Amino acid sequence: MSLVLSHRPRRAPVTGSRLVRAAAGAVVLLVLLPLLALSWTALQGSGDLWPHLIANVIPHALFETTLLVLGVGAFVAVIGTGTAWLVAVCRFPGRGVFEWALLLPLAIPTYIQAFVYVDAVHPLGPIPTLIRTSFDLRPRDLWLPEVRSLPGCIVLLGLVLYPYVYLSARAAFLVQTASVLDAARTLGAGAGEAFFRIALPLARPAIAVGVTLALMETVNDIGASEFLGVQTLTLSIYSTWLNRSSLPGAAQIALCMLALMFALVMLERWGRRHQRTGNIGDRARPPARRPLSAGAGALAFLACLLPVLLGFVLPAGHLAHAAWKRISFHGVSETILVETANTAFFAALGTVLALLLGFAVVVALRTGALRSGLALRLASLGYAVPGTVLAVGLLVPLAGFDNLVSGLAERFAGVSTGLLLSGSGAALIIAYVIRFLAIPIGGLEAGYGKVGTTLDMAARSLGETPGGVVRLVHLPMLRPALGGAALLVFVDCMKELPATLMLRPLNFETLASHVYAEAARGTYEDGALAALLIVLVGLVPVILLARLSRPRQG
């Protein structure tokens, strides 16, 4: 026994360690490359366009983006935190259903939400028509809020993004010790005072994480803001690059957007710099659910019902009805089948590469090839970079690579290779990998937290190589983490719109770009089937997430 304990596992071969370290370094470089290229492109200057941008485009776009971010942040914080508190600590009719149903809006991308509501609340749309028919009203007697506006954009984005806050806040409320809340009540604090003075401050870090994720998605949005008439920085980047043919101008606006994102994150961290939270005792006993009175229970039921009804049931039902009408009259076209195949193929390639590269970085840290977790943080930066910014940053290095290869081929072989990366769809796959690399890294890092290092030591003491330990010990235990990460990356690739619009090859359409094109033409019914397919695929991870997020009894 003493011999086994004193035995030192063999070190990994130097060449293997260097190979893993080089692979992790290449992944980090891949993520940082578009950001470095973006800065270099912006420094080139946009000539006479910059005075116009700084005078007319950037101030208005920055103002609208700031208002949108503040509005969505407040909306999702209130709705997500309020519903999480009701579900976690109160007892009322339908609570068990709302526990998972409140996550359903995550399946609907923001641009599809705008796509649906612009069509549904149009003066001749189904909702106004139903109301006029039911109450025998004339068109001028019916008034509905204007969807194509900044407030409309805030509400519609908030209805899709509040589950980020709901999920994190609910988890925080469930792990808070009941003894703390019980002590507050014995000292005379009412339910409301205990919530605002005890539960809410303890859950603030989790709420901040959910709000930050929601704001990242808000800044990344391009379809909803364009459909609803909100001139954001993201939309300004897209229009400056395409309509004005100015890549440096688009890069300069992109840097302004990155500065805004950085300022928001720093402001949130500064606001809770002195806060320390923790549970008292060895085990956190979740608070017992308080039964509500009939009136309070009805209000709680309504408060949970409205986000689900407006955020998922209504848009999904409208899409299903419009898609059924389209299929009944015209059938399923070959075009939509081709676009579905394109979407699945590109999303699958992006998913496989993201898993491989993410696994390389996490394994490098686990095996000691990397001494610091800084590489993981740098490799995860892509998720905080909006798709339009990422696309602009990739254009210059990929075009430079294509020109270099084509020049060498002409010089030595007398043939032109053309646009190998930027013209073949490889640029879009690279963008998918960089944008969503944080998902497999985070999932695998959490999965490795459950794999004790003693298993590695035992396998090495039996003569297994580091590669064998990864293959025979780590991979079987990481299958759930790999499967969950693969599903999330695949769905996010299918839904991604900004990078897809800017980097897809010519005459190449995905389901997301098809929905965008139909909405831009105003032919909403023609894009309903593509939108419904995206929503149905997006439901799969939401259902799994709902199952995993249920608290275990006992």
Image: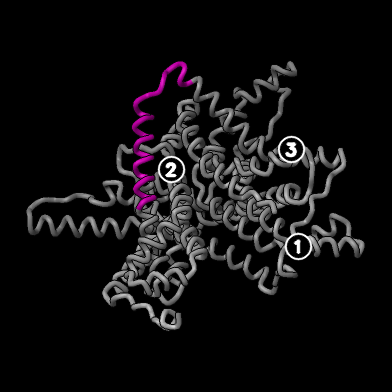
Q: Nearer the viewer, residue 471 or 80?
A: 471
**Residue at disc 1, secondary structure:** loop
Which residue lies at the image location 54% right of the left edge and 65% below the top edge? 262
Kind of residue at disc 1: Thr
| Number of the label disc, if any, that sits on residue 177 | 1
Q: Let me know if residue 464 appears in the view.
A: yes
Q: Residue furthest front?
A: 1
Kind of residue at disc 2: Met
**Residue at disc 3, secondary structure:** loop
Which residue lies at the image location 68% right of the left edge and 44% below the top edge? 99
Separation of marks 1 and 3 at Cα, in angstroms: 25 Å
Which of pointers 1 and 3 lies earlier in the amino acid sequence? 3
Q: For mark 3, does the 10 Å Cα neighbourhood hold few (<14), some (14 to 19), or many (20 or more) residues? A: some
Q: Main secondary structure of the magenta part?
A: helix
Rendered position, 320 above or below 213: above
Task: Using the rendered view, name the quadrant where residue 494 is placed.
Answer: top left
Magenta highlight on residue 508: no
| Number of the label disc, if any, that sits on residue 94 | 3
Quadrant in which the C terminus is drawn: bottom right
Q: For mark 2, does the 10 Å Cα neighbourhood hold few (<14), some (14 to 19), or many (20 or more) residues? A: many
Kind of residue at disc 3: Gly
Q: Nearer the viewer, residue 374 or 487?
A: 487
Quadrant in which the N terminus is drawn: bottom left
Picture coordinates of residue 481 (x, y %)? 47, 55
Residue bearing mark 2 = 494
Q: Let me know if residue 253 appears in the view.
A: no
Picture coordinates of residue 532 (x, y %)? 50, 32
Which of pointers 2 and 3 lies earlier in the amino acid sequence? 3
Q: Which residues are magenta?
A: 326-352
Separation of marks 2 and 3 at Cα, in angstroms: 32 Å
Rendered position, 94 above or below 274: above
Which of pointers 2 and 1 lies earlier in the amino acid sequence? 1
